[in-house]
Image (cartoon, rainbow, N blue to C red):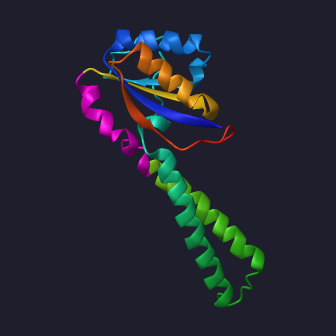
Amino acid sequence: MRRRLYFMLPDVPGARAVLDELLLARIEIGHMRFMAREGSLPADMPDVSILQKTDVVHGAQLGIIIGGVVGLAAGVFLTLFPLDGYSVRTAAILLVALGGALFGGWASGMNAAAIPNTRLKQFASRIEQGQVLLIVDVPVRRVDEIEDMIAKRHPEISFGGSEPPMLAFP
């Protein structure tokens, strides 16, 4: 399991130094993302993806839940009050619920792709001022070690918080 940590770095050269130190601490580059003003990061530094910039994941999760519930209700309604000449079986309830969940996840995810990530909203003004946000996913057992290492070597870096542990295989 991993925990996502957020750090605000003063500038791009400072971000480069922290990137190198995390690599030396055996944190894989695939678990690090940087967010800065458009076009200010070098090409060899990992930039945030669309999944991290937007609320698409949260929106899709919410859409799956709502779509599944609405689909289940529609399936039950069709079973209780079938159309003339049709008999709806129990399997149809599950199929309509699954269809509702798929459609709800897709539609809600597409809408949420246009919305900036609400978790990163607190960092937006500082990013516009030229600072760099580091998002790093570290093993839970190494969280304190990484926080202490960054705090000791770079007192100018501010800790932006963390998220609950995430599964290794999402």
Is residue 114 in view?
A: no
Q: Which residues are magenta?
A: 111-129
Left or right relative to 16: residue 79 = right
In the image, residue 125 lies at what x, y percent? 24, 32
**Quadrant placement of the C terminus:** top right
Please say if 23 is above or below 90. above
Left or right relative to 13: residue 97 = right
Please give the name of the residue rendered at 43% of the width and 23% of the height, measured from the top-left corner.
34
Is residue 93 in view?
A: yes
Q: Nearer the viewer, residue 105 or 3?
A: 3
Q: Nearer the viewer, residue 61 or 25?
A: 25
Quadrant of residue 137 within the rendered picture: top right
Please give the name of the residue rendered at 22% of the width and 24% of the height, measured from the top-left corner.
129
Quadrant of residue 124 within the rendered picture: top left
Please give the name of the residue rendered at 60% of the width and 71% of the height, measured from the top-left corner.
71
Please say if 35 is above or below 162. above
**Quadrant placement of the N terminus:** top right
In the image, residue 9 lies at what x, y percent? 35, 20
Residue 122 counted in the magenta span = yes
Q: Nearer the viewer, residue 152 or 32?
A: 152
Please say if 151 is above or below 52. above
Total marks in image: 0
Please give the name of the residue rendered at 57% of the width and 18% of the height, measured from the top-left corner.
29
In the image, residue 120 lies at what x, y percent? 37, 38
Residue 73 counted in the magenta span = no
> Looking at the magenta stretch, what is its main secondary structure?
helix
In the image, residue 80 lies at what x, y percent? 66, 89
